[in-house]
Image (tube, rainbow, N blue to C red):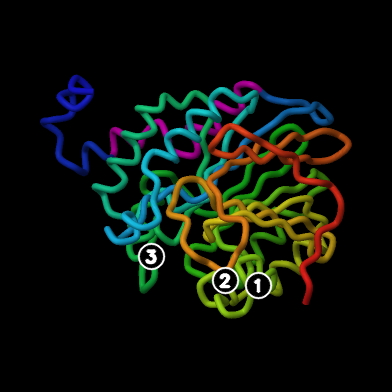
Amino acid sequence: MMMFRSNHDNLSQAQLLTQLSMPWRSHAQLSRLSARPRQTQESFEFAVLGDAEPGRFWIFRALFNQPGVFQRQLAAIQEQAVDFSVQLGDMVSCGHAHNYVNFFRQLNEVRVTKPYLTVIGNHDRSNPHGRSHSRMYRSLFGRSNYFFDYGGVRFVTLDSSRGRLTGLQLKWLRMVLSTRLRKVVFTHMPPVVLKLWGGAAAHHLGGFERGARQFTDLMTALEVERAYMGHVHCFGVQDYKDVRYILTGGGGSPLFPSGASDKFHHYLTVSVAPSGLRERVHSLDGSSFVIPSGKVVLPS
């Protein structure tokens, strides 16, 4: 550790951040993934990890945070037979340079060996809950809306970090989902129509409203198999208009009281096979369970 720090002592924070982030840019990670391709109809697995930021304010960290969870779960993923992992946003408590420096140091300390892809969350922006921009995230990782094809599946990463989807994003989403490949979508915030976070009382905190109906209609029309979402620090599953939405926000962030019943730290491994997708939920204590394939519909 001392050697790692001393090698960077003479760099400015901007130079240090540029150097630390270089290997973790999305195009670099996708290049690693493409070096070991999978054929269409070939089975493989990937991992999904939810919110990881430790809590923006000291009182939240003191009351609800369990230090080291993100690192422990990320390390556990490296032991799984997965081809890559996707982190669903909120990697840092606020999108400032010093927070990202600490985050990249964590990745290096864990010794992440699997290709690691990211989704932008509201905390990864310059201001988590107000007027903000995403310049820092994009300078470190690349585009906040992107897609890649792997093993006969089109994986789409959609930026919902502003608490909305624009018409331009929905147009782009329709374009990239108009494919004969199987389709999986990753985004940080769930659409509010799902009510996966405890109902209408938490409506304004639990997801995005603008563009939510158009988003879910598009997902159904273009036959998306799965949507994985974070933002709310809990677990939930819902089949809505023939699409399965999985809320997996237990990556290490504080487990706030949210109105949701399933609040526990966890990550997912997802098996992709010709017969379909199956998720296994891995809890922090080492136990796991498979999400049943039967239809899950919340009462209206």
Spot occupied by residue 159 in the image (x, y as percentages of width and height): 54, 59
Dot 1: few (<14), some (14–19), or many (≥20) neighbours within 10 Å? some
Q: CA distance from mark 2 to mark 1?
A: 6 Å
Marks 3 and 1, the one that precedes in the sequence: 3
Q: Amino acid at mark 1?
A: Ala
Residue 265: assigned label: none
Q: From the viewer's perspective, is residue 268 above or below residue 92?
A: above
Q: Residue at x 47, y 56 (%)?
A: 255
Quadrant of the image occupied by residue 9: top left
Residue designated by label 2: 208
Quadrant location of the N terminus in the rendered image: top left
> SS for tag 1?
helix
Would you identify the image quadrant in which residue 3 lies? top left
Q: Which residue is mark 1?
A: 212
Residue 229 is at least partly visible in this image: no
Q: Are dots 2 and 1 in contact, CB under 8 Å? A: yes
Residue beneath disc 3: 128
